[in-house]
Each structure stands twice: as C-alpha cells, then as structure tokens.
Image: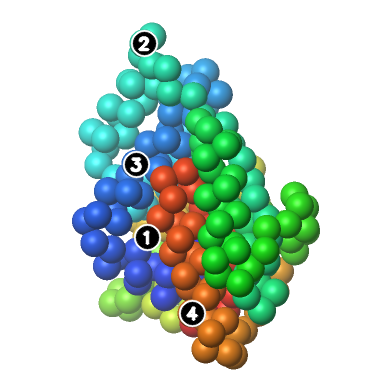
Amino acid sequence: MSGHSKWHNIQKTKGAADAKRSAAFTKIAREIIVAVKEGGSGDPNNNSRLATVIAKAKAVNMPNDNIKRTIDKALGAGNTDSYEAVTYEGYGPGGVAVIVEALTDNRQRTAPEVRHAFDKCNGNLGAIGCVSWSFDKKGVIVIDNEDGDMDEETVMMDALDAGAADFEADGPALEITCDPDAFNDVVKALEEKGYSFVSAEVEMVPQNYITLSGEGDVKNMQKLIDMLEDSDDVQNVWHNWEND
C-alpha cells in the first residue's frame, strides 16, 4: 500500500492485474511466515501478529487455502526461510517523506536496491528517524460503500462500539481508524457484524500531506513508488504525497 488508504489507492487495488495480485500474495505469505516464526504459533488467537497479517490477507482476497498452506509451511520442521524486518527512510521529489518497510533474507541486496530507486527518482535515502516522526502508526480499515447500500451512521456506531478511535466517510470509502493494539479486536468485532473490507492493516499515517505541482516531480514520485513496490523484498511504501 502507498500512503494513506485514500479511495484512489483502493480502486487501484481492486482493479489490479493478476500478476500484481500474485505478487501481493507472495509478499503477504512472507509476512505470515515471519509472524508464525516470531510468534511461535500458527493460531491467530494466540498470535496477535499473525491475526493482523491474516486480516490484511483477507482484505486483498487471498484464498483461505493459501493462508493455511503458508502457515503449515512456516510450522514445518524443514522450513528454512529466514527473513528480517528492515525499515528505510528518506525523501522523494519535492521533499515528500517516504518510509519503506522490507522483509529480506539479504540486506546486501535490499539496501542498494532501495537506494538506487531513490537516486534514480531525484530523491535521497536518509537516516532512520529522519521522517518517521511525522507519521503515526494506526490500524486502518476501509469498507467499500460505492453502491451506497450502507448507512454511514450505522457503520460509524458499529465501529466505535468495536473500539475504533475515529470514522471518516471519504467518498465511497468508509475509513475506520484505531489504536494498533486494538486493531485485531476491532477487525474481529466488525467481521462478526458481517462487514468485509477492501483494506485492513496497521499503517504509517502521515500527520500532513505534500502536494507536488511540477510535472517532473509528479512523474518521479510515481516512478519511485513503482520501483519500490516492484521489489520482492519491499512490503510497504508509506508516504505523505497527496496524489488524489
């Protein structure tokens, strides 16, 4: 995901080509493996990190069979997959703040790849902490109300009753935010009420946004996002570019 869960990003996700969807499943599978190994359990009821990843997987329509197979693989005695979480921070064109979250089995491959993307697109990689101070970690859940079938006030009350901190109707997208520690409980409560999601994950949400006016900056920023997201090691790209 790029930036905050604005509707244009959700539309892009919904219309993704099979190749993009397959790549997304592969990246989520990597997250599942890490969550199982670090949490020591394949049961989401006893592994909060795994529960969070499964919510993300379901939101992008990853089949339950795929999720189960990946969990079984992670629990297998012969599984030698070993990934570490690495975060990179920097600035894109026009001073856009960018956070890159990766899971890698080889830092010597990932770091140069990320740096190359920044250099190629008129950005620069910085030190850890150079931009993360301007983001807040939040659980973000988006419900599609494009058909207008859901009553916004009802959804808001259900979300707040479930433990959400805030609710916003952003066009056809109903966006629910919560404390990261409450994310799994909020997701579970809303699922029990019959809601399904087009996006559900813990995100780095910008405190403010930057608008790029120059055509060159816009093209370079989009290219930077694409290059980073095309990397097999990169899981998430968060930024404060207002690209509606």
Circle 1 residue: 198
Tell me the residue at 52%/89% (across/down). 215
Label 2 sits on what residue type? Gly
Q: Are marks 1 and 2 in contact (CB under 8 Å)?
A: no
Residue 57 placement (x, y as % from top left): 37, 45
Q: Distance between the residues labelled 1 and 3?
A: 18 Å
Check disc 4 and give the amino acid type: Lys
Front one among 165 and 66 = 66
State which mark lies toward you, 1 or 2: 2
Residue 144, percent from left and from top: 36, 68
Between 182 and 125, which is closer to the camera in this rendering? 125
For the residues bearing labels 1 and 3, Cβ distance under 8 angstroms: no
Reading the chain from its start, which is encountered first: label 2 or label 3?
3
Disc with the residue nearer the chain's start (1 vs 2): 2
In which quarter of the view is residue 126 placed? Answer: bottom right
**Which residue in the structure is indicated by mark 4?**
219
Q: Label for residue 26?
A: 3
- What distance separates the C-alpha of mark 2 from that of mark 3? 20 Å
How much space separates mark 3 and mark 4, taking CA atoms?
27 Å
